[in-house]
Amino acid sequence: MQATLLTIGDELLIGQVLDTNAHWISSYLYEQGIELASTMTVSDSKLEIGAALTHAAKTSRVILLTGGLGPTKDDLTLEAIAEHLELPLVFNEETFARIEHIFKELIKRPLSPLHKRQAYQPQGAQTLLNKQGTAPGIWIEKHGVIYIAMPGVPREMKYLITEEVVPRLLPLASSKTRKELTIHTAGWGETQIATAIQAVEDKLPSHISLAYLPSLGTVRVRINAEGDNGEALLKELEAWKVKIVKLLPKELIYGYGNTSMVEVVQQLLLKKKMTLVTAESCTGGMIAHSITERPGASKVFYGSVIAYDNSVKKKLLGVPDHIFKQHGAVSEQAVRAMVKGILPLLGADVAIATSGIAGPSGGTPEKPVGTIWVAIGTRNQIITRKLSFRHDRATNIARTSTTALDMLRRFLLIA
Amino acid sequence: MQATLLTIGDELLIGQVLDTNAHWISSYLYEQGIELASTMTVSDSKLEIGAALTHAAKTSRVILLTGGLGPTKDDLTLEAIAEHLELPLVFNEETFARIEHIFKELIKRPLSPLHKRQAYQPQGAQTLLNKQGTAPGIWIEKHGVIYIAMPGVPREMKYLITEEVVPRLLPLASSKTRKELTIHTAGWGETQIATAIQAVEDKLPSHISLAYLPSLGTVRVRINAEGDNGEALLKELEAWKVKIVKLLPKELIYGYGNTSMVEVVQQLLLKKKMTLVTAESCTGGMIAHSITERPGASKVFYGSVIAYDNSVKKKLLGVPDHIFKQHGAVSEQAVRAMVKGILPLLGADVAIATSGIAGPSGGTPEKPVGTIWVAIGTRNQIITRKLSFRHDRATNIARTSTTALDMLRRFLLIA
């Protein structure tokens, strides 16, 4: 089944917004066995949308569209589809009643006349119930091509793709099955991993492919297989996975399949019945934020002191004056003292402490931007590590967070 | 000048790689006054590249291609261009000599026979010197359309775009200039804004367009103008901006142009010579993280207590027991007490406190998931607000952070 994705919006074409929708959709569809033949991005112009539809309809059985379903005048997707299919736009009472209901019961604001626009749809279209917003998804088939329009708001688009679109597309997709396995690693670069597993990679049969997906200090190794029998493919992938895993250090791998570093750390803490706190300087709360963004944090996480200013390191965490004078706030001694200070203060079992120069300013020849100290410790044992990154501020902060969580994971494994 | 960008590569279509090239190119070209009418992504298939070229050639004067210039068999861009233009591929001695030289002098590895492929190009093409790698850029014009092929490696692509492509395109670009103005708002939805400014929007001349870009409780209103005289356009946009701004509450607008909520808050704090701290429960450090991710935070931000567990709210922030018993941790009383506790603790002037049920669990009929209390205050004055969101956990957290920063901004405006 050939599918084309059409994302719509001026903001995507002038670089104001990174098109993460296209990335998410292509990745999710691929996992479901639906591969995109192409994606297109066009501006909020009926002419451009129409030209793209004409092109896509020549080669694709399915055309997915995101964006341009809002209530304002620059939202033209449905008008463009209607013109392309030579169908009138008709008013859908049911959709309008739903929008009215949402405003009355949930938003508790009067309905604007503009919202009436969102209830018009090409004649003959089915609506896809959008439980995350006012604009419904639209599904319409003509001349053997299926047109699926979704809002551009990521939350609403994701809901429609997972709950409405893919369940309807799957029965139409090809009989070939695709399976995949993912090995999550942290600590090595992709070249180092590729070198270690080359002997296995060279022997992979042609229906199995391997990819390295690096991101902020982690690398996912993904193996895919395509064939007729899903169960047989999974067995085959499992066997290759075992061969790959044998060639890598055990602690390098933090999980398999659909997992994340935060999930693994939360589970390890639960298993060890330990509670975590953080004392963050340069990471400024990002570690606490990553942990608490995932449900279930309250079982293992007590809280943090973001000791951004040195006065907080002194006053709350009790980092002694002589450490600042002799070693500075960015030092092994400082992060050790931060761990020692926060554990009794918040009454937890294990702590992460960070202090460093995230940039862009604040570097010295001795401690250039990207110099960051991390400590992990309990009341009995503290380990530390000096990181030397060369990225921009946001990346330095993000990589430090991931590295600190990986240090905690390795610490808990042997704790 | 209509331009289309064609990015080529299987990895872009299965979500393995986020297409940051398209984002960078569209943003850079826009700054240079060259707007992309559309972008397309296709797989490493001669058929798909050919179909995309046929489509793009119909509407565009310039087609930029990235990717598929490597030495391996899945690199098919030049073959596809040659077939599309019905031109033979010819061997370019000069390019080959350069590749030989790079391998001999710089890489110090023997040249692979595969690299000979990189020296073939469509007859009549000009090469664009790529000082960052072996594959040259290719520039060829036929039937009034310019085809420009560049490698997909970001460093090489960026070099070619800035040093070779844009300098050649600019003299061909239309004399039309484009200007834009952005109004940043927080607190209203796009429909509410659209309704308020409809009278002005209806009167906009055809060379001026207006777009609403909503994101997590903020909406950017962008007006663009196209014409001959950049200075005149800016004056015109300024005049329309004034008309729009008059129809909106003053405090709704937090900035203009290239700014962010965090930047505005940082600048307000600097101006008022005030220091900020946060006491975060449900936001779990996200507010501290957003503030510290931006350079300059250390001038206005002391730190935070992430009081995720109630024990931390009691012990460190001194929230009294009777508040938990009578009102619960998610209450106006609790966030007030958190502000009162953190200000003297960290010695700052103004504090943000949050406490709520981010979800997915923890809701009750009285306090459903998405019920969040926020307080902003100094030693003399505390304001509070109850938020009722209906999003997933991550979105509830993110919207609370933005809303809290906006509350702080409004608080500082009259402080």
Image (cartoon, coloured by chain):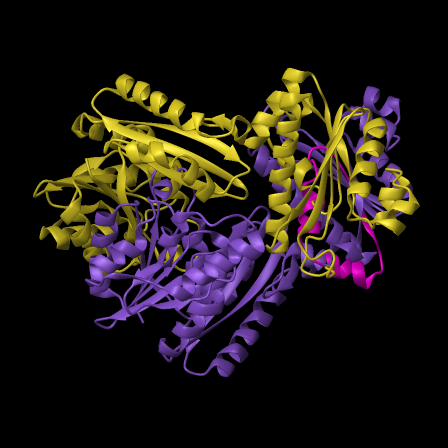
Chain colours: A purple, B yellow
Q: Position of residue B405 (x, y in %)?
A: 63, 34
Pick the quarter of the image with the N terminus of chain B: top left
Q: Using residue A346 as the reference point, say whether residue A187 is left or right of it.
A: left
The correct choice, above or below, for B81 with respect to B266 in the image is: below
- Which residue occupies the foreground of this view, B262 or A387? B262
The correct choice, above or below, for A250 with respect to B403 in the image is: below
- Which residue occupies the foreground of this view, B181 or A248? B181
Pick the quarter of the image with the C terminus of chain B: top right
State the extent of the magenta-drawn residues as a range.
A266-295
- Which residue occupies the foreground of this view, B39 or B231? B231
Taking the spot 57% from the left edge, 26% from the top edge, the residue there is B264
Total numbered badges shown on the rendered structure? 0
Taking the spot 68% from the left edge, 58% from the top edge, the residue there is A263
Q: Using residue B195 as the reference point, say whether residue B252 is left or right of it.
A: right
Q: Position of residue A304 (x, y in %)?
A: 79, 41
Instruction: Indicate whether residue B319 is drawn in magenta.
Output: no
User: Would residue A32 be seen by someone viewing this image from the given angle?
Assistant: no
Picture quarter containing residue B263?
top right
Instruction: Indicate whether residue A282 is drawn in magenta.
Output: yes
The correct choice, above or below, for B281 with respect to B336 in the image is: below
User: Would residue B402 be seen by someone viewing this image from the given angle?
Assistant: yes
Q: Position of residue B344 (x, y in %)?
A: 85, 27
Q: Using residue B147 as the reference point, say whether residue B329 is left or right of it.
A: right
Picture quarter containing residue B23?
top left
Q: Using residue B352 as the reference point, say whether residue A2 is left or right of it.
A: left
Picture quarter containing residue A240?
bottom right
Taking the spot 62% from the left edge, 28% from the top edge, the residue there is B409
